[in-house]
Image (tube, rainbow, N blue to C red):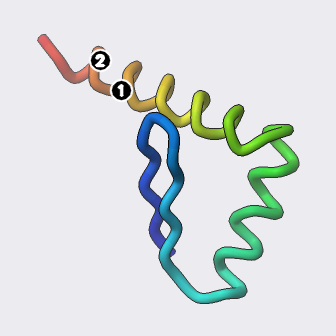
Amino acid sequence: MEYIVTKDKLYVMGKTLEIKEFFKEKTKLHRTLKDFIISEMQSHEALIKRKTP
């Protein structure tokens, strides 16, 4: 299963059961989809800052 997060959208590709488990896991950590997207964007930005010399 793969997913792509943009500033305001989430694209998920995979088998139905994988996607169901993905959302089950993420809803334990984040109250809303917006919270999840914000968290992913912050993680991505932090990773970029770490890799940039």
Q: Residue at x 52, y 82 (%)?
A: 14
Q: Looking at this view, name the residue that lies furthest to the left.
A: 53
Could you tell me residue 12's position as x and y percent? 52, 68
Is 7 displayed left or right of 40 in the figure? left
Q: Quadrant of the C terminus?
A: top left
**Rendering quarter of residue 47:** top left
15 up-or-down from 47: above or below: below
Q: Which residue is mark 2?
A: 50
In terms of image quadrants, where is residue 44?
Answer: top left
Q: Residue furthest top?
A: 53
- Discs 1, 2 touching: Cβ within 8 Å: yes
* Front residue of 9 and 47: 9
Q: Please tell me which residue is depicted at 79% across the width and 40% down the height of the picture.
A: 32
- x 48%, y 76%: residue: 13
Q: What secondary structure is found at the residue carrying circle 2?
A: helix
Give the crowd class for mark 2: few <14, some 14-19, many >=20 residues within 10 Å: few
Q: Which mark is residue 47?
A: 1
Going by the numbered disc 1, the residue's amino acid type is Leu
Q: Position of residue 9 (x, y in %)?
A: 51, 48
In the foreground, 5 or 18: 5
Q: For the residues marked 1 and 2, what is the alpha-carbon distance in whole angstroms?
A: 5 Å
* Above/below status of 47 relative to 52: below
Q: Which mark is residue 31?
A: none
- Residue type at numbered disc 2: Arg
Report the side of 17 relative to 15 (left or right). right
- Give how far across and how far down residue 48 sits, in percent: 28, 24
Indicate the quadrant where residue 2 lies: bottom left
Q: Secondary structure at mark 1?
A: helix
Q: Residues within 10 Å of mark 1 (few under 14, many from 20)?
A: few
